[in-house]
Amino acid sequence: MSRSRLALDAAVQSAGEVLARRGARFEVFARLGQTTVVTRDADGEWRRGATREVGVACRVAVGGRAGFAAAAGSGARAGREAARAALEAMVPDLDPLPPRDALGTAPAPPPAAVIDLEAQESFAREIAARLDRARAGLQLARVRTLGGASTATLATGEGFRARAEASGVVVELLVAPERGPWRHFHFAAREFATLDLDALARRAVDATLLTMAGPSAPHALADVLLAPAVAAPLVVALAQELVRPRDGASAPLRAGRVSRAWRLTDQRAGPEGLLPLPCDGEGMPSADLELIGTGRIGPPHATWADAQRTGAAAGGAVRPSYRHPPATGPANLVVTGAPGTSQARLLERLDNGFYLAVPAGPVRVEPGRLAFALRAAAVAIRRGRPVAAHPLVELRGSIRRLLAGLEAAGDDGEAFSLACAVTTPSLLFRRLGIASLA
């Protein structure tokens, strides 16, 4: 067993000993995360480094009171500090901990091999070389690769114990054309070996050149085809609204029309998606949580505590880091497209509208109105053919329109690491708003 795992186990054991002496129900969560980074900025200098985050957190419930606290570090000392702080932080509250018989694990694909920093730098240099050799008029302003791996241990005072491991990689490219806005490209996978260097470089070059310059787009309601990179943040925003604990406030969404083209699951145990895990953030066994399918929104999912208040099904907890208690949220989103529906076929079905090729910022959602806005580079399509480029437009609409307006999903799924893992193909929507920002 590695020294890191031994340190995590020592933290869990020491915290459990402190909490058991109080006769409390408790949960101890310890996590070790490591990230390697290789970067080349505009000055041409290569830099590489690594960060490490390790800590332990405790949830405790006794005598009608509950508490949560976390401490950085591993080993017995960190465990004792977290346990004592959780006891001191208790306030009157319901017991938030699931019972032992509700906890468990599910089979999940093993994580990828540990990231080798030398291999990561080699990948970064190779893709940079391909961009440097690209057509005149483009400059690679920045390339950054990240490799991440984590190990987490969850234990309760009732004898449940689980370990979860995850890993993945991200490639980010910032490309500067002679004219127009710089373009940011994001690619994610379980390991670098599964990423096609030539395909990534070609996609960045083609999309940048295609949308480098052009007239302002008209303000209009239009049909739009979203490339996977543009669809991904919208899918995450939609999922967050569907799983957010709302105490019945999500009824308007559930009462509206839902396109039968939607097939969206939180595929927590895999095998698809970027981040499958054997259990959720508080030890419930992982399962496919259907968010949208067969023309309807699936039942809400929640943490154990939220489920007791709202009647939703428990099993939807996420834990962004050891510093956070479990909260309801999406984890490993997968949008399934129709077999054989290529992007070329989707463009034919678009006929007249806009193809949004590259995002140009995060999606913004107005919680009260459930309206969204997302900036992107677009290409005007007429009779299935490109007729004009628009360097910057804003896609506008509502979450209800996203639910009702999906016409088709392609078969070109790509993975992204955003607020959660998401794998989505191109998505064709009817009647969303387009506004020019150029």
Image: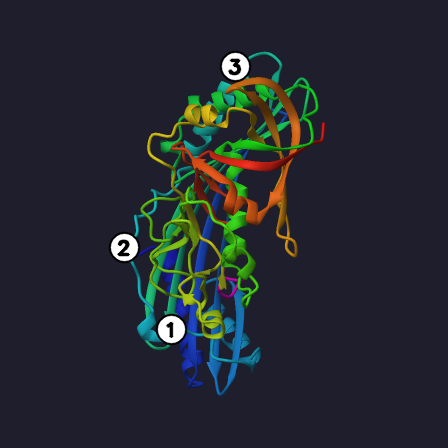
Q: Position of residue 34 (x, y in %)?
A: 46, 49
Q: Which residues are magenta?
A: 321-326
Q: Earlier in the sequence, mark 2 or mark 1?
A: 2
Task: Give me the disc on residue 107.
Answer: 2
Q: Is residue 245 above or below residue 222?
A: below
- Badge 2 crowding class, 10 Å Cα cut-off, few under 14, some 14 to 19, many 20 or more, is some
Main SS, magenta residues: loop
| Relative depth, front residue between 178 and 430 | 430
| Mark 1: amino acid | Thr
Query: Which residue appears at 45% of the width and 71% of the height?
Result: 311
| Mark 2: amino acid | Pro
| Mark pair 2, 1: CA separation | 21 Å
Question: Which quadrant of the figure contains the C terminus?
Answer: top right
Comparing labels 2 and 3, the label whose residue is closer to the camera? 2
User: Which residue is the site of mark 1?
Assistant: 156
Q: Position of residue 265 (x, y in %)?
A: 40, 50
Q: Position of residue 233 (x, y in %)?
A: 54, 42
Question: Which quadrant of the figure contains the N terminus?
Answer: bottom left
Query: Which residue appears at 43% of the width and 53% of the height?
Result: 296
| Mark 3: amino acid | Arg
| Mark pair 3, 1: CA separation | 55 Å
The image quarter containing residue 3 is: bottom left
The kind of secondary structure element at disc 2 is: loop
Query: Which residue appears at 56% of the width and 30% of the height?
Result: 356
Q: Earlier in the sequence, mark 2 or mark 3?
A: 2
- Residue 174 in view here: yes
Task: Give me the disc on residue 177.
Answer: none
Instruction: Spot the residue most to the bottom.
Output: 63
| Relative depth, front residue between 126 and 185 | 185
Task: Give me the disc on residue 133.
Answer: 3
